[in-house]
Amino acid sequence: MKKRSAQYKRFTRSRFGNFVYFLFLIAAGLFTVLPLVYSVVTSFKPLDELLAFPPRFFVVRPNWKNYTALPDLLSNLEVPFIRYVFNQLFVTFAVVGLQLIVSVMAAFVLCQVKNKVTKALFLIIQFALLYNGTTLAVPQYLIYCNIGIIDTYWVYILPGLASTMGIFLIKQNMEASIPPVLIEAARIDGAGVWRIFTSIVLPLSKPALLTWTLFSFQNAWAIQSGNSIFSESLKTLPSVMGSITSSGISRSGSAMAVTVLMMIPPILVYLITQSNVLETMSHAGIKD
């Protein structure tokens, strides 16, 4: 017993090592939140502090003028502001909901059906993770033109239906957290595929689903029309807010106010789902 205790102690950190480790984590965390803190602080700066040189990190005389000026800036829009809000909410919830449904069903099939076709499909999904949106912009635009969805809501929704990252993340988590013997036992008891999927797989995949909901919401909330939406009535909030942020340094305070307001929904979603993120990521690359 003493030998085992001594061996265990040899592989543990000392108190000083723990102190250095947590000190590093705290410093890294503070460095990570600096852009968020700077955005909030700058949104309360008056114009003279925005023009001050050298620039100051903290605000000396905070006020709400940058926020109260937003209604005047948004009142001269070609389309009512509520229309942009509706577009943003509709697109976000449509993309998140449909993407979650497609990802979890595709991951379930890839987990349960083991043959050459599914292995080849999963290999293609892994290779697809190497390509970003900029690389796919031209092929996507040509596809939009050929199927006739330019200047429609489908430009926002269709590209996000089949997410390679979502399928990969949920599939890896299913394989790591759902024992095959549990599925086999359900089949022996007479459960069908749909019953297994709804009663066993979905409840046990809740951490992965909530984690992907967070990532999907962040991407969908920041989605912009690009060069595929020309009708002003179909544009989303990031598009109209970009017109404020590109109006020069005199409106940099209002631009930061817009940035802070746009950050609130993703932060709220993160607070709801953050307890499941670590558990999912710990299983994402593990396979029995």
Image (tube, rainbow, N blue to C red):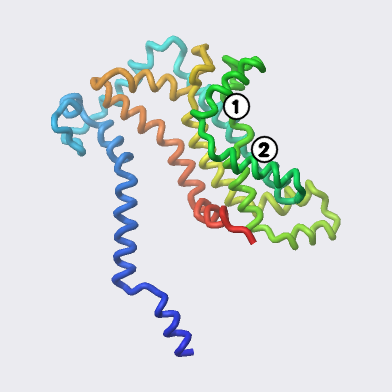
Q: Which residue was labeled with disc 1?
A: 157
- Amino acid beneath label 1: Ile
Please give the label number shown on residue 134: none
Secondary element under disc 1, as helix, strand or loop, is helix
Please give the label number shown on residue 102: 2
Q: Does 76 sit left or right of 164 as displayed? A: left
Residue 111 point in image, percent of width and height: 71, 50
Examine the image and state in which quarter residue 39 appears: top left
Residue 173 point in image, percent of width and height: 61, 53
Reply above or below: 282 against 142. below
- Amino acid beneath label 2: Val
Pick out the residue farthest to the bottom: 2
The residue sitting at 59% across, 15% down in the picture is 150
Reply above or below: 106 against 150. below
> CA separation, marks 2 and 1?
12 Å
The residue sitting at 40% across, 79% down in the picture is 10
